[in-house]
Amino acid sequence: MTRTLSNLCSACGRSLVLLGLVAMGMVRVPAAELDWSSVTYPGGSLSNTYNNVDGTTVDITFDFPSSGTPVGSNAGSPNPSTGGFAGGSPEINTDVTTNDALYIELQFDPQTPREYVTLDITFSEAVNEVSMTVFDIDFGANDFQDLVIVRGITSGGTAVAPTTLTDDPAFNDTSVGFPGDFTDTIFSDSATDADLQASSIVGLSANGTDDRAFGIWDFGSQELVGVQLVYTNSIAAPNDPDGQWVSLGNVFFTPVIPEAEVYWAGGAMLVLIGFYEFRRRRRQPAQESGQA
């Protein structure tokens, strides 16, 4: 009976060691994706929230702040543009992509460097490995010149540039300047043109095919609670641009486990206890045999 109990306790010790190692390995979780083809978006709505995205505990809210008198086709206007949304947007469609994406069509009227629309993407908890693609960032001579700026927002409210910014050189570029008073009128965090340059893509050529004129913003290991997308015109746009549009592709992210250190501490403790119990029970039979 004593030997059987000892063996059982030794097995328990080994189990504790294994549990500890598992707990210490639970710090990372799989990447997640907000896939537009698996959700709905109420067409024309200026705000919508998706709960427990891709099986995680993360909720994501998409919000187009509005101000002033409702104009355009929807009950709201780009902040603080006097133009409005058009074409039933924001909505999910495949107008400029082969896969579903969040379509944003705007009518800026008249054009000034102060006209723009913001899309605030808010995560309910900290995430990292955030990446997203915006499609159809292009240029129409005497019509418009798309300019898209995407910056991450940290838990402290600081705006950060992406770790990697990828353009589609056949249609757009990351090295074009900004309108004269652009930074002063849109951003309130004293952002410089150089700061925004690292987060921006400007359209340079017309786009004739789906899934092109893209820009990819990848924030890598930076821990974020949100992303701000600004859509406007750059310096080559006319005073009264035509309607223009872009589409936001799927949003990728990885949830951050705030209590990661707890997993490590708890796991390490289980390993130590299990190892101690395993060694103690292995020595006990020999001690009992000597006493006999």
Image (spheres, grey):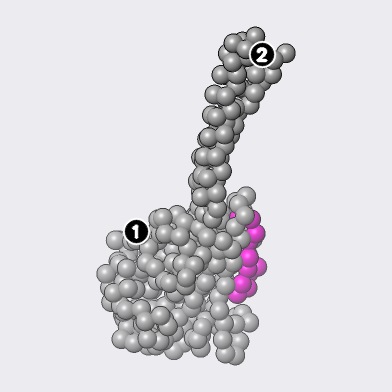
Identify the residue under disc 2: 3
Side of 209 relative to 277 (left or right): left
Q: How many marks?
A: 2
Q: Is residue 182 left or right of residue 85?
A: left
**Mark found first going from the N terminus, 1 or 2:** 2
| Residue at point 55%, 29% (across, down) | 276
Of 239 and 79, nearer the camera is 79
Q: For residue 199, what is the image quadrant? A: bottom left
Is 109 magenta? The answer is no
Please, what is the dominant secondary structure of the magenta stretch?
loop
User: For this rendering, which residue is in front, 126 or 183?
Assistant: 126
The residue under the point 65% across, 23% down is 9
Q: Secondary structure at mark 1?
A: strand
Quote the CA–CA distance across marks 1 and 2: 61 Å
Viewer can see residue 32: no
Crowd around label 1: few <14 · some 14–19 · many ≥20 (10 Å): few
Q: Which stretch appears magenta?
A: 41-53
Amino acid under label 1?
A: Thr
Which residue appears at 57% of the width and 31% of the height?
Answer: 274
Q: Quadrant of residue 7?
A: top right
Q: Helix, strand or loop at disc 2?
A: helix
Residue 49 drawn at (x, y percent): 63, 65
Q: Is residue 43 magenta?
A: yes
